[in-house]
Image (spheres, coloured by chain):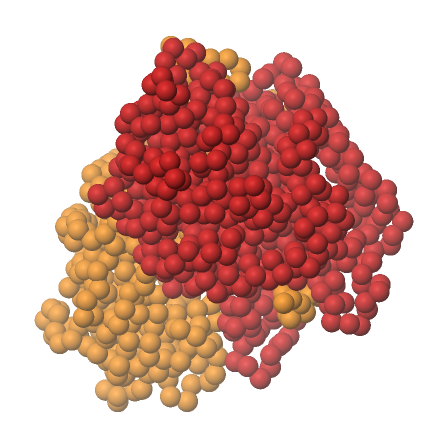
Chain colours: A orange, B red
Amino acid sequence: MPAYKAPLRDMRFLINEVFDFPTHYAGLANGKDADAETVSSILDECAKFCEEVLSPINLPGDEEGCHFENGAVRTPKGFKEAYDQYVAGGWQGLSHPPEFGGQGLPMSMGLFKSEMMGTANWSFTMYPGLSLGAMNTIMQYATPELLKVYMPPLVEGRWTGTMCLTEPQCGTDLGQVKSKAEPVGDGSYRITGTKIFISAGEHDLAENIIHVVLARLPDAPNGTRGISLFVVPKYLPAADGSVGDANAVVCSSIEHKMGIKASATCTINFENSTGWMLGEPNKGLEAMFTFMNTARIGTAVQGVAHAELSFQGALAYAKDRRSMRALSGKKEPDKVADAIIHHADVRRMLLTQKAIAEGGRAMLYFAAQYADHMVNGILENDDAKYKEWDNKLGFFTPILKGFLTEMGLEAANHGMQVFGGHGYIKEHGMEQIARDARIATLYEGTTGIQALDLLGRKVLLQTRGKAVREFTGLLARFAMDHMTHSKMRRYATELAKLAAEWNVLAVRIMLSARKDREVVSSASHHFLMYSGYVTMGYFWARIASVASQKLAQENGSESAEFYKAKIATARFYFDHILPRARGHAASMVKPSQSMTKLPVESFVFE
Amino acid sequence: MPAYKAPLRDMRFLINEVFDFPTHYAGLANGKDADAETVSSILDECAKFCEEVLSPINLPGDEEGCHFENGAVRTPKGFKEAYDQYVAGGWQGLSHPPEFGGQGLPMSMGLFKSEMMGTANWSFTMYPGLSLGAMNTIMQYATPELLKVYMPPLVEGRWTGTMCLTEPQCGTDLGQVKSKAEPVGDGSYRITGTKIFISAGEHDLAENIIHVVLARLPDAPNGTRGISLFVVPKYLPAADGSVGDANAVVCSSIEHKMGIKASATCTINFENSTGWMLGEPNKGLEAMFTFMNTARIGTAVQGVAHAELSFQGALAYAKDRRSMRALSGKKEPDKVADAIIHHADVRRMLLTQKAIAEGGRAMLYFAAQYADHMVNGILENDDAKYKEWDNKLGFFTPILKGFLTEMGLEAANHGMQVFGGHGYIKEHGMEQIARDARIATLYEGTTGIQALDLLGRKVLLQTRGKAVREFTGLLARFAMDHMTHSKMRRYATELAKLAAEWNVLAVRIMLSARKDREVVSSASHHFLMYSGYVTMGYFWARIASVASQKLAQENGSESAEFYKAKIATARFYFDHILPRARGHAASMVKPSQSMTKLPVESFVFE
């Protein structure tokens, strides 16, 4: 397994030079404490924790996996100790309000933290990660009494939380949820049902586990409008805030999975378990989806994480392994052969990984500023502001989640490929990265669901194309501003064309969809991937622009090489990755019949 | 794990209707026995063996894996029994000469067999598969004495063989091979060295294992021109043909791999082991590569195999799992939700799998006819004929191996994706297919090596573009023949354009390469994938053409639905997969600098 080295210089380049977070934080209600020095020292501390504590237990955690016995889950060796250090460091409450014991820093800082932790050890990061989802939901919908009981230990990390949505018969289609909730009469409910695929549903890291559960009240309407949300603790909290009696919550099994093996994926049975409602009756799905955008961005991080880690591993190997000679002549004449990094095709794979990791990181950090504004809307009780930024984020989220997780999987596969046959062997850890990356396009809404959310909901239904017009406005503005700059002209020209094309494609699909609803589904994948490639292109152009400016100031210094590398990677992206958008552009406007016409029984003949 | 059902109807469609194998066989020296009835009953028998014997031990074999203890490898439960049945059925010698106990049928029939076996259980198929590689090499280069000793038990399957190329320091770059061979003086040699990644290097299926080993004679020239080839048995054959004393051949470990876990991947130590030379001194690499084209086609089969098996699993699930409603309205109004096969985006994934499996199969069967002609050249001692067909095959082979294994991996990933989160769970077997598929782009020459072989050797060096001109001649002819047919016009038009473009691209790269050798590497991946997409498009057009003709005769019958499905899949391929070639076309003509310019030390900054 490649030992993780936090790419702090790349992160700081985006934070300080490309996206100017210092100014951004200065304008936030909760950004006053996030001065440059604080941010910098938090990044350093977090990097240290990830490199020294989380990274070393990543490969052994995969090898050992989780143990299940008599309803209890034991995490792999070292996980409990690492989690204790995580809690002691106060990391869980980094972006949560001081009233609950958190540090009250902007949400984006939580993202920097998650990115480093997830890259070092994705399985470990799932435990506190799911808890963050539960915390956000509880914080937004719980009564003051429940808040007082649950938030402080969750923010501390002494307790963790889960999100219990999926049941055996349904995942995406939550209208099929069957779990029941019967009111007891004292304000509590009895919850009964089986939930599957519950990440961190049971483990030995924390003293209590707080499940956020979707269930139906008696006589609730059918479908999604009859689902309510409940908080159901593993142990009932005692009056003094400590852990009291066991609730009737049973983990009946854990899944044997392709990857993220150190993360326990549990089947949880609720058997007349005591719970309390979050939010209003029958509005559970809305409540659950409030923080969906941020949760999905949390999963999008996985694409960047695996691309980065796989790149780090492949780069080291490519410098070390010697095979054949470069086509243009010997690069290391005194060696038996040239290091494989001298072969253009190996560089193609490395640069693809690099472009995905760094371009994806830029997309995430940009979105994180939107998320910061959205959270500020909540903190300031400014509903219009909340909605404005949540909508902006809403367009961007499925692109991040859908596109970056697909690209992360591609990058992880390139990392194996650079290793040749050795990439397939467990001891190098490269295949683990590919197995871990594979879940990311499946959970938290599959890529297909992200595509439908983007095209069907965010573009067509909610905004009739306005979301694309707004976002491509940024591309067009960038293009205008850079058209006369000799080094930036090619990026500007291409982005101007793509901005126009993206709108044309959206309108063409909108018009087709009036006659043929199926086109929304048949075009959705291509539209998502096209959007992703163009968006990443926009950020690579912005990176190239900043790097060009800095280079003019810094030529000759070692920093100059840093900026030159950014420009070279942007060029690679525009030459070798962005052109893939052409195929998607061509395919998305094809009639839906090429997918829908074949009768079900004609897929196969015997 | 999806239970494998041999797609006999699809296979027969290609064999009898698209490629007219009956006429093809009638024209072969060794094709007389391959009459339609014989072929048909062999297909049926083989399908039965694969469905009933090999398929049921595929998932358990992955779970159990191979056991290693004290130099011995134990294969998973059921493998030995299955192998005994394989031997008893005479399957190993299907395409080998009767003089060695084989059935003497054309090589293409061995491919039909391998495809079915490999789809049912790729790990199992590796054992006899590697043996076929060894058999072909021995048959071509061994002395009459060695032939007599080794061929009959290998053809019977009582013994198996391996190919020992890779060493810890080199795989692709065989010029770095260090293993030594010292002549004893009695015609035998003492072989010493360590070989890694030896598939089927040690196991409990056969009574002897015959290693074909690359090693250097004393004072051999450096590099690839100093490598010789040897046959080194695990047990020295006794005079009566039985197994005699143990040779000094030791399996020191087996690899822990991402997939194909039931296939033993061994480190083999030769310690003054007794061996005999195959072919001439210092010409071992040429000898080893004689059957490289057919060996690589054998690996290309894996792309089709995993696409087919994953499609079968995903199709069954997509008909069964219910989620949401189709966008154009309820398809199964009496059910709680529509089966997911009614969603266009799910069909996109299924049709992609189907297009890859069936289009890939067509590519393989076409190549198999070339291989039959090539073998006939050998059988008839007609060196010119051998070379002619080997050259034709030589252009096609890297496309098959490189492109189809990449597409097989994509198809296996779609299969998991159709299952949603359930695709990630071991019990369904879908993730195993993806793990098994992952090796195919790595071994037998990585995709990068195939790309370089195609563009650098087959197109530029050996034929200066003639290979492309010849092959695209087929596309152009098809286009001419079909331009006036209303249902075929779109395929004809597109293929005519692509045939021209493919040549233009080859010429452009050739001209660039005169000034910049690196462009051969920087363009190679895009050239390979472009070639693959266009080639598969050609075969889908041929399939559509045959299906259209048949449909005109059979309209209304159940067969009509079969042909309609072929046409629908061809249309899907042209609308949703072939357009990817555009991105590759754009990228392959970019200057190599976007890959080569970045200094090695600038890939990362700390």
Query: Which quadrant is home to the N terminus of chain B?
Result: bottom left
Whether residue B404 is situated above or below residue B88 in the rendered picture:
above
Query: Camera-side residue: B65 or B597?
Result: B65
x%, y% of residue B37? 69, 59
| Residue drawn 81% across the image and 43% down it | B478
Number of marks in picture: 0
x%, y% of residue A172? 47, 68
Left or right of B23 on screen, residue A411: left
| Residue drawn 53% across the image and 63% down it | B48
Left or right of A489 on screen, residue B3: left
Query: Camera-side residue: A458 or B333?
Result: B333
Instruction: Tell me where residue A516 sits by quadrant.
Output: bottom right
Left or right of A242 on screen, residue B18: right
Query: Which quadrant is home to the C terminus of chain B?
Result: top left
| Residue drawn 28% across the image and 56% down it | A263
Q: Is residue B507 visible to us here?
A: yes
| Residue drawn 13% across the image and 70% down it | A243
Q: Is residue B111 visible to us here?
A: no
x%, y% of residue B355? 63, 54
In this view, the residue farthest toward the front is B240
Instruction: Tell me where residue B276 sits by quadrant.
Output: top left
Whether residue B580 is situated above or below residue A336 in the rendered picture:
below
In this view, the residue farthest toward the right is B484
x%, y% of residue B49? 51, 61
Query: Camera-side residue: B296 or A359?
Result: B296
